[in-house]
């Protein structure tokens, strides 16, 4: 079987409070064949408790990347999927764990992929969820749908493994055939910043009364998976609008 590039898929844990969860997540990752862990502002790391819970997966902890923000952790990624137990006010493209596994595996040959997990107490913030192309929800008891963090990591990583074992490497997917590389999370963040600036300059957008405009635009552009060439066109258009505004004033 053509072994897909699981080395291109990272697990990102945001502001984890309990180091035991970091260790148990590392173990789940290694069991399922993943090795890249990024920690966004962990409360306690490095930690003996994490090492104990990681068992034979300690090398994942020693190689873990520690960063300050989710944006930094996913900057180079062409696909970012955030795990969330709750549905939010603004609907986002939602994958089942099986769809998440297939998609991550299919795209890993093209660009880095990130699977993002939130805090034990409050999960991921709306802002963090909006950095993601898709959300994944693990079906659970509606009266108690919130899994332990490392258990959620296990379920999602298991579905990646399952997709690999089933040969669901998605060669036929659009992402595989595309001629241009897709824009990275970092390209997208710069674009959204630029777009917001121009919409404010045009008096189309009032940051004091945002009415979810930027969230809705993020969702729109996230959904169509912009490639780098398209991104350059959009940035060029924004630049020209800015220039015209300057000429007029
Ligand atoms: N009380 C928090 C849940 C935190 S659980 C909340 O309501 O959001 C810690 C993390 O595990 C979550 O941020 C999410 O990434 C993951 N997780 C837990 N249960 C999940 C589920 N049913 N589906 C998807 N992710 C889940």
Image: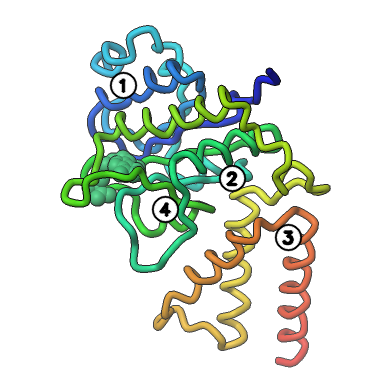
Mark 4 vs mark 3, CA separation in Å: 22 Å
Residue contact at pointers 4 and 2, CB within 8 angstroms: no
Residue at image mark 2: 79
Mark 3 vs mark 2, CA separation in Å: 15 Å
| Sequence-first disc among 4 and 3 | 4
Quarter location, residue 197: bottom right
Mark 4 vs mark 2, CA separation in Å: 14 Å
Whether residue 207 is situated above or below residue 49 in the rendered picture:
below
| Sequence-first disc among 1 and 3 | 1
Q: Residue furthest right?
A: 179
Mark 1 vs mark 3, CA separation in Å: 39 Å
Question: Looking at the rendered structure, which numbered label has been put on residue 24?
Answer: 1
Q: Quadrant of ligand 1?
A: top left
Residue count near mark 3 (Cα–Cα under 10 Å), binned few <14, some 14–19, many ≥20 = some
| Sequence-first disc among 4 and 2 | 2
Residue at image mark 4: 128
Numbered disc in front, either 4 or 2: 2
Residue count near mark 2 (Cα–Cα under 10 Å), binned few <14, some 14–19, many ≥20 = many
Label 4 secondary element: helix
Residue contact at pointers 3 and 2, CB within 8 angstroms: no
């Amino acid at each position: 079987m053509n072994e897909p590039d699981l080395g291109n898929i990272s697990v990102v844990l945001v502001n984890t409070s309990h180091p035991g969860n970091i260790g148990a997540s590392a173990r789940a990752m290694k069991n399922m064949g993943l090795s890249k862990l990024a920690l966004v502002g962990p409360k306690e790391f490095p930690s003996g408790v994490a090492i104990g819970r990681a068992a034979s997966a300690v090398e994942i902890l020693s190689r873990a990347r520690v960063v300050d923000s989710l944006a930094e952790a996913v900057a180079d990624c062409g696909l970012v999927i955030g795990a969330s137990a709750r549905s939010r006010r603004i609907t986002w493209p939602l994958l089942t764990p099986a769809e998440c596994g297939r998609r991550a595996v299919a795209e890993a040959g093209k660009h880095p992929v990130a699977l993002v997990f939130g805090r034990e107490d409050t999960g991921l913030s709306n802002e963090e969820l909006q950095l993601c192309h898709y959300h994944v929800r693990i079906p659970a008891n509606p009266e108690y749908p919130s899994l332990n963090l490392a258990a959620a990591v296990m379920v999602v990583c298991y579905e990646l493994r399952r997709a690999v074992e089933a040969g669901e490497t998605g060669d036929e997917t659009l992402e595989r055939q595309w001629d241009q590389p897709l824009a990275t999370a970092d390209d997208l963040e710069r674009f959204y910043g630029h777009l917001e600036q121009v919409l404010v300059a045009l008096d189309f957008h009032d940051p004091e009364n945002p009415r979810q405009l930027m969230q809705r635009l993020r969702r729109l552009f996230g959904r169509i998976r912009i490639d780098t060439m398209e991104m350059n066109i959009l940035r060029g258009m924004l630049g020209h609008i800015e220039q015209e505004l300057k000429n007029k004033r």
